[in-house]
Every structure is written in C-alpha cells, then in structure tokens.
Amino acid sequence: MTRKRRCLITHPDLGSGGSEARAMTLIETLQSRFDVALATCRPFECDRLNDAYHCAVDPAGVEVRIVPMPALLRRSAGGDALKGAFLTRFVRQIAPEFDVLISAYNFVDFGRPAIQFVADFSFDDDMRRALDPAAVGMRGLLRNSPLSRGAYLALCRRIAGGQVSVVRRDADVVIANSQWTARLLKARYAMDCDVIYPPVHAEPIKTLARSSDFVMLGRITPDKRVLEAIDILHRVRERGHRFAFHIVGKIGDDSYGRRVRRHAAHHATWVRLHGGLYGNAKYAFLSRHSFAIHAHRREAFGIAVAEMVKMGIVPIVPAASAPAEIVGDERLAFTNADHAVDVIDRLLRQPRTVGEIRRQLAARGALFSKSTLDTAALELVDRMLSPSAFAHSEVAA
C-alpha cells in the first residue's frame, strides 16, 4: 500500500488575523491528500478557529506538535522572536519526517526547501522599526535599546542554532500576501515572489437601511492608530457632518487601551466602544453601517479592510499600504490626517459616488476568496514535490 505523504505546517501563535485564516485554509485543503501535522507554540483551538474562519478542519486529522519551550514564555504576550527561535529549533529537528514543509507565517528555517508565506516584516528589525511605531512601555524600551535588543537577538540565535530571521533558503517558494509586500521584498532582498491574498470570509446580511456611521475593526494597538482616527473624524464632524464612530475590537488594560478609553470618553456623544465582536454578531453589526476608517500607515495586508469590503462597507485607508491595494480606488486613500479629512468630507457630500464605489468594491471582494488559496495551495505543493523543484538554486541576501 502506498504511503500517504506527510505535510508539516507551522504557525507560531494561532490567535486571530490574516495568517491564521491562511493556516486554517491550508490545513483544510491539504488534509484530503496528506497526513498533516501542525507545529505551533500553544494549544490548537480547532473549533474556535473553524468558527472564526469558516473552515471545516477535522481536528482528528491534524497531528499537533506543540513546540517545547519554558511555560512562562508560552504564556507571555510578548517574546515573539524568542518563541520563533524555539519554533525554528524544533522544526529543524522534525523536518526530515515530512515530504512538504510550509510556514504559514513568515520565514522559517526548516533546514530544507519549503513554502514560505510572508505576512509582515516582523522578522526584519530594521524594516519593523521603519514600518511600525515604537512599542510602548517596557516592551518599547527593550525593543529600541540597541544593547538590550542585541543581547536578546543573540540569545534567540543561540536557541535557534543559527539566524533568527532567515530570509529565504535555496529553492524555497516565497509567497507574499499583497503586491505591496512583494514590492518591499523585491526592493529589500532582490527577491521575486508570487502573490496570494489571504482568504477572507464575510457574510453580508441584508438590512433595510445602513446608517452613515463609521466603523473601525481590528486590534486596539498603537500601530492601528485608533486615537488618530478619532481625531480625523472629529475634524470631519466639525465640517457639518453627523455620524457616530463605532470601534470594534477587544481593548486591553494596558497603557494604550486606557488612552483609547479616555479619548473615547472625551467624545462620548459620538464615539462608541463595542469591544470584540465575532462571527455572526460581527457580520450583523457591520451590515448596519456604511463607512469605515483604517489608519495603520504601512500594513502588509489588512484583513479587516478586506472583510469590510466584502460586507459592503466603504473604507477610507492610508495610501502607502496594502489596504489601498485592497480597495483599489484612489478616491478612498489618504496620505496624511489633513488629506483624510478632505477625502471623507468630499465622499460624504457625494452620495451617488458612494453607490458607485460600493458596487466596485463588491466586485473586488472576489479577489480575497478561500477557493483561490485552495487551488493555489495544491499547485504549490505539487511544485515542491516535483523533481525539477530542486534543479535550480537562488540565494537572496
């Protein structure tokens, strides 16, 4: 009897986001053809993830390999590079057991050629600092101190048994999550790669009418610039427009979460904090509103924006990031806060234009489908298993 081939998929922390949607879709798609194993740093919550990403992964058909590491680190909200080091060391040990190796989140050094899905630039310290604002509090101090950061990364390298941030091995297949990401990979590493958008599930619910309110959806963190979004919409309201602003996302009890609460309280007549909404509750809520603002300046994809596009919401987004690629309309993109105020003001004064834009966005939503990744995943695996896959070698910086 022919042995069923084995596939290892890695993801450091299956929480919530675009890379998690990709990981679950990959597992579901490949289960029918392979014995699939998942290497990750915390317990695999299959039911929650199936519900969140509209997948049908069979938990009995996934061999879960939990990466060995100190319990304190596993429970920590930080230490991503250190967790990645333990993941790298572990998967290099078990990689010989598998026929196909896939990282669902950024570059992993398996010690052999693999399929590498790039989700962001957290693996590159210089790029991370350039693209995202500094972290706040003690974490920010440790990240931005050359001495402490250097010592931390040296420890990670020692644990991993090599480089912490491996940027492509010979014969890897590299997949970017947007054209924006692909252009940066090309500019930074002279690396050519394919682009496959993350799968985005959304279920529009027909309503009698939508409000003219704005929504922000996603993590409540400094890089999402929630405070700046409130200020932008406050200035739009000063031009005579009336709407509420609904902020949807779990707000932590950290310093930034407390700042968001205080700022929202200052504008309590029109700013609403809803906390986290998930599944059908989220879709029902989004279906009742018309507009959104997304303020992350330089984001590699932006699954919240793609969700809102598929839900019939018109998002206003930064021009210099992948969300502008998602909406595909320069009328919805802004370059700075002043420009954002002008863009929104102009849009709200042209209701016929809004209808036209919403129809265009509905067509773009098809780009972010689960079926696209299903087909692409099978093709990528066939490419890796082909004898010609290793007939050439490319070395990147």
Image (cartoon, rainbow, N blue to C red):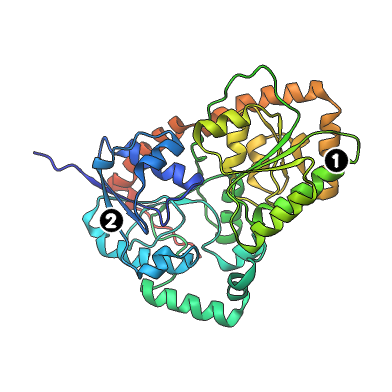
Q: Secondary structure at mark 2?
A: strand
To which residue does mark 2 refer? 65
| On screen, residue 113 above or below 368 | below
Q: Position of residue 45 (x, y in %)?
A: 36, 47
Disc nearest the viewer among 2 and 1: 1
Q: Position of residue 5 (x, y in %)?
A: 21, 44
**Mark sitting on residue 236:** 1
Residues at badges 2 and 1 in contact (C-beta under 8 Å)? no
Q: Position of residue 159 (x, y in %)?
A: 37, 74
Query: In terms of sequence position, does the residue under pointer 2 or pointer 1 come before the other?
Result: 2
Q: Name the residue: 37% across, 57% down.
A: 42
Considering every residue shown, the one lying at the far right of the view is 239
Q: CA distance from mark 2 to mark 1?
A: 51 Å
Q: Secondary structure at mark 1?
A: helix
Residue 24 lies left or right of residue 385; in this view the side is right
Q: Nearer the viewer, residue 6 or 206?
A: 206
| On screen, residue 178 above or below 285 | below
Q: Name the residue: 51% across, 35% down.
A: 200
